[in-house]
Amino acid sequence: MRVVFAGTPEFAAVALQKLIDEKEALNIDIVAVYTQPDRRSGRGQKITMSAVKNVALANGIAVEQPESFSLKHELGQVCRETLQSYQADVMIVAAYGLILPKAVLEMPKYGCLNIHASLLPKWRGAAPIHRAILSGDATTGITIMQMNQGLDAGDMLYKVACPIQDDDTTATLHDTLAVLGGEAIVTVLADLVNFQANAIPQNDADATYADKVFTQDGLIDWRQSAHHIQRQIRALSAYTYVNQERIKVISVLPVKPEQTTNEPAGKIISVGKKAILVSCGTNEQGVAHLLNITGMQWAGGKMLNAEQIANANKLNDGDVFEIKADE
């Protein structure tokens, strides 16, 4: 089976590597890899290859990096003809980042399969891992989907679930799901005709959408419940202000039911060696809990744990985190 793989970040690179490792068992030939064009990134704005491109080059696989498949783009038709020339039986897509028009979706014999990091139809869209943690979901997973022109709306071929732990972050859950995604696509390719014959349509009425995450989504409102803020810190690049300084909040412990408070939201109750205790707003039951912060980062500095923050007198008991809108 001739396979074209399309993806860009580390999540996709893990799946590509798994397919490379299993290509003999699956009797597949990965004839080309499609990935986003090289971008400038980091403080030095150096040109950087995608994680997927790195894997492809390390394994001697042809790499294509089109800007667009749209016929409105000056090279759109050329990009389509190049893809057609690979004569793919199937195209595997994982966090690619380019829209695939209907003609592209229908080009391979078995169409295009997507590795999606949620249990569809829940969390269609750009940020399913972030949104699952933010919403307090107990479970997420991987769906292998037959792609159509809708937003993550195609028929489902295979689903595998995994729990979301109380201390999971977007990074840790991403790594778990990346491995699951690689295993899931191998399972489907091993018996593709059967999985496609038994595909299950999604119920659009059950769909939820994982909107793109923006920087300001990480701004902590201390009037929210401790559980809400704890999920926000785990899911996003969370930040707050104290004495007009912006500080990243890096890590936090699960909320302890016995740690309740009557202090104003945002007040630092204790700067200890194990955690910084902060008062939060009330939950739906009208109870306010303390949040245990274990890691923070000031502008221009490295991450500090609670003990380092206490020793450096970065924060003091009685300080109050500000509720401040971004400029």
Image: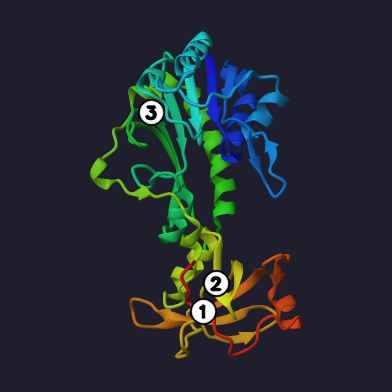
Q: Quadrant of residue 100?
A: top left
Name the one closer to the observer, 145 or 198: 145
Of the two numbered discs 1 and 2 on the same chain, state the one appearing first in sequence: 2
Name the residue: 46% across, 15% down: 80
Question: Which labelled disc corresponds to residue 322?
Answer: 1
Q: Quadrant of residue 304?
A: bottom right
Of the two numbered discs 2 and 3 on the same chain, state the one appearing first in sequence: 3
Residue 287 vertical position relative to residue 182 in the rendered view, above or below: below
Secondary-structure class at tag 1: loop
Secondary-structure class at tag 3: loop
Q: Mark 3 or mark 1: which is in front?
A: 1
Question: Left or right: 321 with respect to 317?
Answer: left
Q: Residue under label 3, please give it.
A: 147
Q: Residue under label 2, please give it.
A: 240
Name the residue: 42% across, 75% down: 225
Name the residue: 56% across, 34% down: 182
Q: Give the amino acid at mark 1.
A: Glu
Name the residue: 58% across, 25% down: 65
Q: Position of residue 248 (x, y in %)?
A: 60, 67
